[in-house]
Amino acid sequence: MNINFEKFENGFKKNKLLSLILIPLFILSLIFSITDTGNRLITFIKSVVGYEALEYVEVNGQTKIEQRLHLAKLEATKYKIPSSSMMVVKFISLPFLNEYNKRETINSSMAATVSPIKSVSGNIVFDGGDCRVGLKAESFDKASMKASFGVTFISCTDNKGIAYSFEPSYSIGYLSELSNPGISSVKVNDDDGYFTIFPETNYLVQLYEPVESIDKRGISLFGRF
């Protein structure tokens, strides 16, 4: 930007009042022009490198199970509408699939609900984090790294510390990925030779039939989960 200071000085002498008004406006416009250019440059750089503001969330708990449970309760705020036939869950105890075909191997695991649930006949809504879902591995294909899980039970604790459960002797549903609802298999994670699910991922539990009732069992010995 070239400025003829001699002409500017002559103009200033001829009309001091006008010059006193124009000079601040000129300086302000120059500042805003530089600032706007800088902001556009920063925005462009962010878009190129995929910049995203980091969000730090403190997760309480001394063990991995406690931390996952606390995280499930934090994430529960995203879900408001309860269901009696499907629920978003987060694993709190992980299945061990390395020796799936061996008879003595127990392939059971447990997940915490993230979304709220209620039975068809009941008036109580159990918030995310209030229920546990029992899951058992029903198949594991190492070649495709896919596994299927059946739902074995649902147990909940209400705000008063009263325990409820639904524990039939048969599988009542299956596990699917959130991105593939209706598909009864999920990807398996090879964690340095340990075959399990992805612990930080939320999954979808879909029941074959809506839960008619969740039976009241009495005061929970452990209080609320």
Image (tube, rainbow, N blue to C red):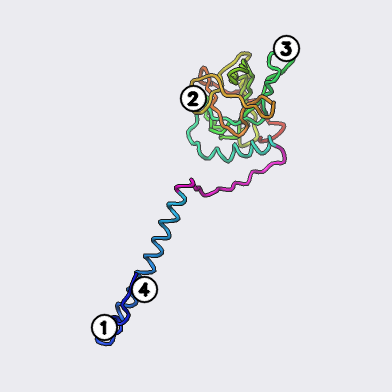
Task: Tell me whether the residue at label 1 lies in contact with that at label 2, contact meaning CB atoms closer than 8 angstroms.
Answer: no
Residue at 53%, 19% (x, y): give it. Answer: 184
Three-letter code for the amino acid on which mark 4 is drawn: Ile
Instruction: Give the residues in magenta.
Output: 47-63
Residue at 44%, 48% (x, y): give it. Answer: 47
Q: Quadrant of the N terminus?
A: bottom left
**Between 5 and 216, the one nearer to me in the picture:** 5
Q: Is residue 124 left or right of residue 66?
A: left
Report how far apart the C-alphas of labels 1 and 4 lie in the structure.
17 Å
The x, y position of residue 5, in whole percent, is: 32, 80
Report how far apart the C-alphas of labels 2 and 4 lie in the structure.
58 Å
**Residue 148 visible, this angle:** no
Q: Is residue 78 placed above or below 203 in the rendered structure? A: below
Report how far apart the C-alphas of labels 1 and 2 lie in the structure.
73 Å
Q: Which residue is mark 1?
A: 11
Three-letter code for the amino acid on which mark 2 is drawn: Asn
Q: Judging from the image, what secondary structure is the residue with disc 1 in? A: helix
